[in-house]
Image (tube, helix red, strand yellow):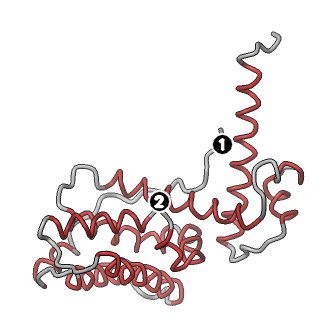
């Protein structure tokens, strides 16, 4: 049946979306391999798209790598949001998100490497982990659960702990990731002003099941 004016643009849009998704997935794979500076030709070959298609979506490799990283962070953030639905205590939201993220370093090593490759730039982006952590810190302070003078400074400590913990778990596979993560979470809660006994209890509560993170774009 001939394409109507309505269906033809839709097919074109879906084709463009598939091409963009393939490029983002390929870029995420290179980042996970520790190759964020892979040549554009290799990226397009991995994505199985033409070289010319790259520039229909991205102006440079650097732009693609930034987008690929940020979309991975946001996918992780959406999963955390789903797993904290129904939790009213911002301190518990903060603790659970940190503890789940710590476990992802082992269970989703490719996603973990994307996070670690971005480093402390995580603090400067408006999607993903950092804004969620900052919201929880501010909400905890407003609710009297945390005692913090400057939430942004507290976030720098949390971000540093997240990155260093991830690197430690990669470098020392003999360490128990859950035990290490929960201990760091307890220490962070105490740093945020929580009493030691409550911090320990909150950092060792049962966690929801951590399913695979759909951090790479699905085919459209």
Q: Nearer the viewer, residue 24 or 62?
A: 62
Looking at the picture, how far across and down is residue 17, in whole percent? 70, 41
Q: What residue do we see at 70% from left, 26% from top?
A: 10
Mark 1 surroundings: few (<14), some (14-19) or many (≥20) residues within 10 A: few
Quadrant position of residue 143: bottom left
Dot 1: element: loop
Looking at the picture, how far across and down is residue 194, in whole percent? 15, 79
Q: Nearer the viewer, residue 19 or 179?
A: 19
Q: What residue do we see at 35% from left, 54% from top?
A: 81
Please state, as top left, top right, bottom left or bottom right, where the C terminus lies in the image.
top right
Looking at the picture, how far across and down is residue 139, in whole percent? 22, 63
Dot 2: element: helix
Say whether residue 76 is left or right of residue 196.
right
Q: Relative to 29, does residue 79 appear above or below in the rendering?
A: above
Mark 2 surroundings: few (<14), some (14-19) or many (≥20) residues within 10 A: many
Q: Relative to 48, does residue 189 appear above or below in the rendering?
A: below
Q: Name the residue tied to disc 2.
A: 76
Nearest to N terminus: mark 2 or mark 1: 2
Q: Relative to 182, does residue 46 appear above or below in the rendering?
A: above
Q: Residue furthest front?
A: 150
Q: Nearer the viewer, residue 148 or 61?
A: 148
Q: What residue do we see at 17% from left, 61% from top?
A: 89
Q: Relative to 31, does residue 80 appear above or below in the rendering?
A: above
Quadrant position of residue 9: top right
Please state, as top left, top right, bottom left or bottom right, where the N terminus lies in the image.
top right
Q: Are marks 2 and 1 in contact (CB under 8 Å)?
A: no
Q: Residue furthest top?
A: 1
Say whether residue 124 is left or right of residue 7.
left
Q: Name the residue tied to disc 1.
A: 219
Looking at the picture, how far across and down is residue 50, in whole percent? 88, 50
Q: CA distance from mark 2 to mark 1?
A: 18 Å
Q: What residue do we see at 18% from left, 70% from top?
A: 141
């Amino acid at each position: 049946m001939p394409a109507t004016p309505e269906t033809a643009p839709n097919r074109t849009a879906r084709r463009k979306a598939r091409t963009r998704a393939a490029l983002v997935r390929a870029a995420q794979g290179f980042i996970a391999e520790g190759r964020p500076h892979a040549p554009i030709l290799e990226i397009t070959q991995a994505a199985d798209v033409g070289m010319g298609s790259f520039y229909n979506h991205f102006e440079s490799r650097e732009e693609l790598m930034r987008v690929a990283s940020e979309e991975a962070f946001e996918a992780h953030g959406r999963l955390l949001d789903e797993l904290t639905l129904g939790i009213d205590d911002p301190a518990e939201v903060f603790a659970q998100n940190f503890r789940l993220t710590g476990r992802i370093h082992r269970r989703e090593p490719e996603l973990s490497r994307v996070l670690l490759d971005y480093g402390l730039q995580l603090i400067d982006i408006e999607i993903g982990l950092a804004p969620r952590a900052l919201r929880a810190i501010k909400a905890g302070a407003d609710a009297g659960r945390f005692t913090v003078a400057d939430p942004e400074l507290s976030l720098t400590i949390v971000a540093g702990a997240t990155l260093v913990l991830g690197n430690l778990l990669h470098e020392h596979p003999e360490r128990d990731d859950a035990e290490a993560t929960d201990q760091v979470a307890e220490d962070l809660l105490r740093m945020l002003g929580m009493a030691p006994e409550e911090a320990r209890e909150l950092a060792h509560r049962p966690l929801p099941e951590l399913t695979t993170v759909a951090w790479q774009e699905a085919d459209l």
